[in-house]
Image (spheres, helix red, strand yellow):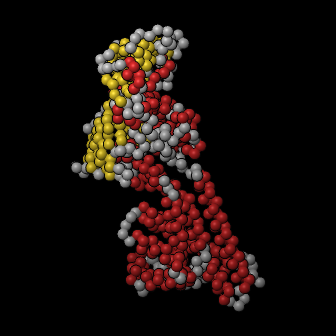
Amino acid sequence: MYDFPSSAELDALRLSLEVALRSVTLSLPFALLAAWLLTRVHFPGRTLFDAFVHLPVVLPPVAVGYTLLLLLGARAPLGIWLRSHFGIVLPFTTAGAALATAVMTFPLMVRAMRLSLEGVDRGLEDAARTLGASPLDRFVSVTLPLMLPGILAGAVTAFAAGLGEFGAVITFASNLPGVTRTLPLALYTAMQSPAGDALALRLALLSFALGLAGLLVAEVLVRRVRRYLGR
Amino acid sequence: MLHVAVSKRRPEFLLEASFTAPLPGVTALFGRSGSGKTTLINLISGLLAPDSGEVRVGEEVLTDTRRGIDIPVEQRRIGYVFQDARLFPHLSVAGNLRYGARRARAAAVLIGFEEVVALLGLGALLQRRPRELSGGERQRVSLGRALLSQPRLLLLDEPLASLDVARREEVLPYLVALRDRLSIPMVYVSHEFDEVLRLATHLVLLESGRVLAEGPVSEMSLRPELQAIIGPELVGAVLEGVVTRLDAQQRSAEVAVGTGTLQVSVRGVRVGARIRLQLLARDVILATQPVQGLSVRNALASTVVAIADDGFGAVLVRLDVGGAVVLARITQAALEALRLRPGDAVWTLVKAVSTRGHAYQLTPGG
């Protein structure tokens, strides 16, 4: 009865990949900044900031999605401003699904980057200083390359986790076929429909395979980069 | 001239040091570990800021807390060779060498890439990664990297301390070559007197964050402050002289020191070379009468200048040997048996072989 793979599965897969990729791209620079602030800069309220960054880990994803809706919804001031000035509409769009995913996976990324930044020998940055490198130059030519394993690990893990984000996406971006119905949403929808068992199983297997592949790729990448860095 | 006068409170001690080093030349900061040597060069480099004080290289003020001047490290043009090399692990040897060079484009070129590679013997290492290098090779690359940043001053923080004795020889001759062929002034932190003897032109003695004494190495060798640091076995006058003659096998040389000559055991020098040697006080023998039938190669007419307790249970006799000062370490009993007093004429006996390993070329001869 089904031709495999069905267009529903392909749509869900394509959407999941797109949402995950966009969410990683969106959060990467901010995660790097947050990791830097939390590792290298002493400022009042750092502990609070740290807790805030990690909030999505402990909050119900639905609560995160709902908060986003409150902040960026069609009638929220920020949402109105974004639409009227930039034409950006987030609720019920693929971009919105990516944003919700980015918020949810942000702590994962920050965590990986922070660990790698803490592992960077400050002495090497001092050496770069004595060789004439300005702060930005040192960051780009020494710190960033040495952080690369952590950045890659963070990005790939966040990507793999982003493929499966459910609660925040369905709350903020709804469950629109071809727009925001990613793999887990399609899986959920299939489970809800009387004839959807076979599709649900295939979607579950697909999610499983993707997740595993993501984690394996992360591991291999990190090892390669470490070897390249001579560690 | 490098002028440093700084104070800095550290958890372990208060550093309050000032010295003035002639440039060019190699200034050794010498003292026990924990005496504040590394803190002091970090203050010169700018990696540490003093609580108060100033650092000047020539006419240029790098730090002056009273006038609020603190030139950033990256603009000081001061090279730094760290004890642990600190090569960038993600770059090849060539990449490490070029790191500083690329960022020194505006500076006058003192030394080029090929010259550094040749001078430090790095040709075969260029494509390697730091982790594939031996400790000595790492330090040579680190030295090359610092040189190529075209520094006006080079700081070296015990660059040999993490190397075993054999590996030290992979680096020390290159440092000597650097001193002799380039005019880049160096500040060299060490707690090995042998390195000082071989490299330094000016010596600053540090103890508990304070400068005990400073001056030319030969002058410092006579100071009790240095003797207290290096211990009785290494106490001995440092003399400088010119090689006037070599024996047929070139194993020993005659060196003009003061108005006399000294037979010393030294290799690899030429006539006309200026050498520095240390006569260990424990190896110097005194005689009140001319001696005969002894194997000792040097019997020098000399005068007792002063006699002092050496602080280690023996007596240190200071002698004038034709204008040069020599120290002899003898027992209290020997002093009493010879009845030595200042002004007495004695024969100072020095075995030529006792200078082996303590004589180094300062400038090559013709």
**Residue farthest along the left direction in this orientation:** B67
Screen quadrant of the N terminus of chain B: top left
Screen quadrant of the C terminus of chain B: top left
Residue situated in front as seen by the camera: B65 or B333: B333
Residue A41: x, y in percent? Answer: 40, 63
The image quadrant that residue B304 belongs to is top left
What residue sits 59% from the left and 55% below the top?
A225
Residue B176 visible? The answer is yes
In the image, residue B288 above or below residue B182: above
**Residue farthest along the right direction in this orientation:** A1
What residue sits 72% from the left and 85% below the top?
A197
Residue B303: x, y in percent? Answer: 33, 16
In the image, residue A66 above or below residue A231: below
Q: In the displayed structure, does residue B106 sit left or right of residue A180?
A: left
Residue situated in front as seen by the camera: B97 or B349: B349
What residue sits 66% from the left and 80% below the top?
A8
Residue A172 visible? The answer is no
What residue sits 29% from the left and 41% below the top?
B18
**Residue farthest along the bottom direction in this orientation:** A194
The image quadrant that residue B27 belongs to is top left
Residue A198: x, y in percent? Answer: 74, 83
Residue situated in front as seen by the camera: B2 or B246: B246
In the image, residue A3 above or below residue B46: below
Residue situated in front as seen by the camera: A231 or B285: B285
- Number of marks drawn: 0
